[in-house]
């Protein structure tokens, strides 16, 4: 397993639409392992393939609490098939937008259809943190960032800050 470098805002790759995974094979399972290793190292609770520069519809999540046994989940070609009318608000962060957090309102529960590591179709009924994390990571696959769910003024300030930091690194 290899820790991959993270793609950071304002990299335009983060806005790219990810393509479906055609076939679940050894390469895809290796990518899942690399993604989990990268996510745990960051440390984070979710990571979409696009965040390590791979525009494929794939994500990994582990919402187990610190000190608990790890419960890594791999979602290939995930698709939200239903979401609750009830809403919930979580303070979200993102490995591609380091050290920035904001409250985001999303559906409180979702049903997600996906392929697992073995290519078998699965459905998960998620609520709480898992539901929020799934929606956040699936957004990544569609080129959407959590800052797209906050006010335009706050979003523009965040983008400006990260654009300035990226230019400073180049110089």
Image (spheres, helix red, strand yellow):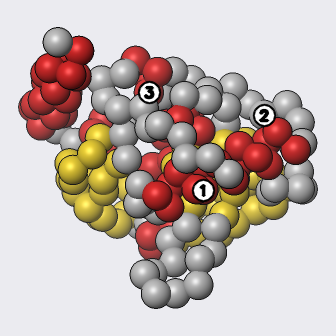
From the viewer's perspective, is the residue at label 2 or at label 1 nearer?
1
| Cα distance between the residues tagged 2 and 3 | 18 Å
Q: Is residue 132 above or below residue 157?
A: below
Closest to the observer, 27 or 97: 27
Residue at figure coordinates x 41%, y 60% from the top left: 43
Residue at figure coordinates x 12%, y 37% from the top left: 154
Report the side of 152 relative to 76 (left or right): left
Residue matched to label 2: 21
Q: Position of residue 120 (x, y in %)?
A: 90, 56
Residue matched to label 3: 14
Name the quadrant containing residue 106. bottom left
Q: Say if residue 83 shows up in the picture.
A: no
**Counting other residues with Cα less than 10 Å from the Cα at mark 2, is it few (<14), some (14-19), or many (20 or more)?**
some
User: Between disc 1 and disc 3, whose residue precedes?
Assistant: 3
The number of numbered badges drawn on the structure is 3
Label number found at residue 36: 1
Helix, strand or loop status at disc 1: helix
| Cα distance between the residues tagged 2 and 1 | 17 Å
Q: Say if residue 23 shows up in the picture.
A: yes
From the viewer's perspective, is the residue at label 1 or at label 3 nearer?
1
Q: Position of residue 36 (x, y in %)?
A: 60, 56
**Counting other residues with Cα less than 10 Å from the Cα at mark 1, is it few (<14), some (14-19), or many (20 or more)?**
many
Residue at figure coordinates x 50%, y 55% from the top left: 39
Residue at figure coordinates x 68%, y 51% from the top left: 1
Helix, strand or loop status at disc 3: helix
Q: Are marks 2 and 1 in contact (CB under 8 Å)?
A: no
């Amino acid at each position: 397993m290899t820790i991959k470098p993270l793609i950071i805002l304002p990299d335009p790759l983060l806005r790219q639409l990810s393509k479906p995974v055609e076939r679940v094979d050894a390469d895809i399972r290796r990518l899942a392992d690399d993604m989990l290793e990268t996510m745990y190292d960051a440390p984070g609770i979710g990571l979409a393939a696009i965040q390590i520069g791979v525009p494929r519809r794939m994500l990994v999540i582990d919402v187990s609490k610190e000190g608990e046994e790890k419960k890594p989940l791999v979602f290939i070609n995930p698709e939200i098939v239903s979401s609750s009318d009830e809403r919930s608000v979580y303070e979200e962060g993102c490995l591609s937008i380091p050290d920035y957090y904001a409250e985001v309102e999303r559906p409180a529960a979702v049903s997600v259809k996906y392929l697992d590591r073995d290519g078998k179709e699965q459905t998960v009924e998620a609520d709480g943190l898992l539901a929020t994390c799934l929606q956040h990571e699936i957004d990544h696959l569609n080129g959407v960032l959590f800052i797209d769910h906050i006010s335009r003024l706050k979003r523009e300030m965040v983008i400006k800050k990260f654009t300035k930091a990226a230019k400073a690194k180049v110089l």
